[in-house]
Image: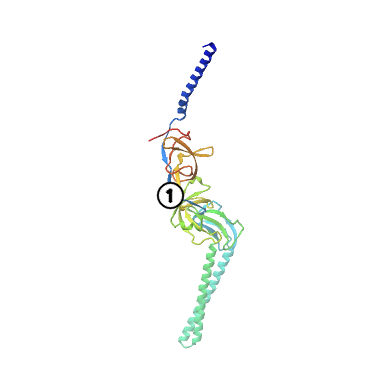
Amino acid sequence: MNKLTLVAFSFLVLASSVLFGCQHAEPESAQAAFEPLQGHLAPVERIHEGKAIEVYGIVQPTRQSFVSGRVVGPVVSVLVEAGDVVSKGQVLLNIQPELIEGQVAQAQGALAQAQAALSLAEKNYQRFKNLHEKQAASDLELDMARMQFEQASGAVEQARGAVGSASSVAKDAVVRAPFAARVVDKLVEVGDLAAPGRPLVRLESLSGRKIWLTVRERDIRRLTKGQTLRVRFDAREDLGTVQGTVDEIVPAADPATHTFTVKVSLGKSNLASGSSGRAEIPGDLVERLVIPVSALHRRGGLELVIVRDDEGKARTRAVTSGQLLDGDRIEVLSGLDEGAKIVIDAPGPVADGTPVEVLP
């Protein structure tokens, strides 16, 4: 063996040693990459439940009133502002009373005249009655005197009614709150003309609210009086889900929209009237595949879960999630089959083939 051949042989031995060393080092690296994943398992479950139907509504006070008067006259003072809390019987505003006082005085004058006429008719009737007993007056004269007395009595009763009516109207010159309430809006200012039927102040009850739901004709059969519904409010996420009770179902549908109004009581809630909300009505039974929420991982717009196969290895699956259900479950629309075992507390997706150690 010459010198050149010896160098070539040495190079081959060195290369073989390096290659052999790399081949033995690769399994050690692969083993480090597939460090066992420890976690608990949960099965993919198939459940049957009613699919909720969302209906929308507007919050209304339990009691509200557009207060008006029966008096015609200019408003001379307004004693409340929007947002004020008033008690039952508290004065809201005053209407100029001069015209009403004149009507009362006129009615009282008419009553005095009627009473005077009654007194005269009664005395005249007694005279003719005495004369008739002495056969000094005819039957016709006695009947005429009796008729005048009875007419005068009726006139007095009529005049008394007019006085009572005028006095009652006079009281309405002072407009009072019909119940304890909050002032939502004042609809007149000083100097405005008040008239019978014209709203002056808008009031609503202090506590107790209802949401008036608009329900489609085909869904109204799903509701009954006393039924409990879950209600959410768009602008009050801090309230979460509120339990409401069906208090009234209006039996007639709106002919234009073919919808029914359902009034749901919210208890002592003090939500602002006019707020929007959504209620859930139980729908038809549907099948769902569900998994715990803790098993779902979101990475770069993908939804992933880790499945443990029959060989105890981890397999990452892309899924499509659906509705978040009660508790900590979420619906899976695609990507999993019923009965598959998934890791529910993994820190995140792992490489396929990673051994899975099930914790007790």
Residue carrying label 1: 48
Q: Where is residue 269 drawn, in percent x and y? A: 47, 50
Examine the rendered structure and indicate whether residue 82 appears above or below residue 321: below
The residue depicted at 59 percent of the width and 64 percent of the height is 99
Q: Local crowd at mark 1 within 10 Å, few (<14), some, or many (≥20)?
A: few
For label 1, the SS is strand
Examine the rendered structure and indicate whether residue 43 appears above or below residue 19: below
The front one of 104 and 291 is: 291
The residue depicted at 47 percent of the width and 86 percent of the height is 132
| In the image, farthest residue toward the front | 1
The residue depicted at 46 percent of the width and 84 percent of the height is 130
Q: Where is residue 48 drawn, in percent x and y? A: 43, 49
| In the image, farthest residue toward the left | 360
The residue depicted at 46 percent of the width and 41 percent of the height is 293
Q: Where is residue 172 drawn, in percent x and y? A: 54, 62
Callout count = 1
Indicate how the structure is coloured in the image. Answer: rainbow
The front one of 240 and 326 is: 326
Examine the rendered structure and indicate whether residue 230 appears above or below residue 352: below
| In the image, farthest residue toward the right | 191
Q: Where is residue 254 drawn, in percent x and y? A: 53, 60
Kindly identify the amino acid type of the residue bearing the numbered disc 1: His
Q: Is residue 88 visible?
A: no
State the quadrant of the C terminus: top left
Q: Is residue 291 visible?
A: yes
The front one of 247 and 52 is: 52
